[in-house]
Amino acid sequence: MLRRLRQGDPGHPGRSCVQSLLDEFFVKGPNGRHICLVSEAAGWSVGQSKEASIKWMFPINIARAVAAQATMGLAYIHSCGITHGDLHPKNILFQIPSFDSWTVDEVYEKMGVPEKVPNRRVDDGPLGPEVPSYSVYPADMVVPADQVKENKIIISDFGEAFLNLPPKTLHTPMLLLPPETFFHAKLGPPADIWTLACTLYEILGERPLFEAFIPNKDDLLAEMVSTLGKLPSQWWDQWENRPEYFLEDGSWNPEMKAIVSPVTRPLMKRLWDMGRGETPEQCEFSLEEMAALKQLLTSMLVYEPCARITADQAMWSEYMMRWGRPAIGMT
């Protein structure tokens, strides 16, 4: 996949927002012959940054810029005929400014001296030739979301990506899975659009779009219905446990026993609840920006995959052109 991405249009606006293949070579060792792939250095993930922050939110222009680049990057990926298949905040990495110009001493100063830990077997037996004598802890460089000052990112991890032969299911975190994964519909680029919409909401706010105590298929589908209304009739009828949550007309089952709040929270309500301010007077988004964001997410979160907008259309949407992409140049 990285080779194919390397062959894409170098002038595409999203090219710099996607992991690059700079070099590749083989290494022979006691475990066989292995290919090594070289890409640009990157830092912590968007997800790690949020988890490390007590506020769980990025400064507003950082959030806008990251959201725009994630959208532009996905548009580039799709332009190469690739479906990412696992797009979520922990596969979006912040780039480290000026890293290529650091000396070894500067690397150690900023990231610490590598800490070596001897490897040993649980039975204290001798190590074989296939095992290195020591391991090195990864560098701890996570910056909490509220302290992030640089906004350049890249989309990484193409281990689940595919071309024309889609998998039967996705391994994306449960709360970001598109509805078609639960009803054995064909997967493709529209699945990325759904997961991108969920990811944009999480980047721009403090919490996930869909929430569940211990996520499972039924609770997630209930959250979708709470936000977007009834599923298409073919899926509504196929949903085996639907009567435990909803009556036939789409209203909540008053006798529901699942650990789900039987409250309808439409998308607009969830936008006001995302952490940027719950009233127009308090909100960091203007009413105009909020309306454009709602329009963008609504067009991405369409149940029928074929009716969702494309990543290219999202990249050129009003929200991205007026608020997202202009923020990329701001720090």
Image: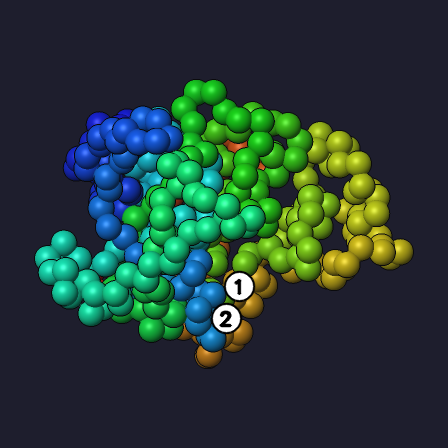
Residue most extreme to the top: 164
**Local crowd size for mark 2, using a 10 Å CA cut-off: few (<14), some (14–19), many (≥20):** some
Q: Nearer the viewer, residue 29 or 77?
A: 29
In which quadrant is the C terminus drawn?
bottom left
| Labelled pair 2, 1 in contact (Cβ < 8 Å) | yes
From the top left corner, tell me how far across and down residue 300 is, in percent: 48, 43
Looking at the image, residue 298 lies above or below residue 101: above
Q: How many numbered marks appear?
A: 2
The image quarter in which residue 108 lies: bottom left
Q: Indicate left or right for 247 with 15 as reference.
A: right
Residue 63 falls in which quadrant of the image?
bottom left
- Tell me where residue 314 appears, x and y as whole percent: 37, 44
Query: Which one is in front, 135 or 146?
Result: 135
From where the camera sits, is residue 321 visible?
A: no
**Taking the image as drawn, is residue 224 in sight?**
yes
Name the kind of residue labelled 2 in the image. Gly
Which residue of the protein is positioned furthest toward the right in this rendering? 255
Q: Is residue 98 above or below residue 92?
A: below
| Nearer-the-camera pick, 132 or 146 | 132
Q: State the mark number for residue 207.
A: 1
Residue sitting at 26 percent across and 55 percent down? 95
In the rendering, at what x and y percent does residue 296 appear?
44, 49
Question: What type is the residue that disc 1 sits on?
Answer: Arg
Q: Secondary structure at mark 2?
A: loop
Split into 4 quadrants, where in the image is the N terminus? Answer: top left
Q: Is residue 215 left or right of residue 103?
A: right
Q: Residues within 10 Å of mark 1 (few under 14, many from 20)?
A: some
Residue at image position (38%, 58%) is: 117
* Label of residue 270 in the image: none
Residue 224 at x, y = what percent?
64, 48
Badge number at residue 275: 2
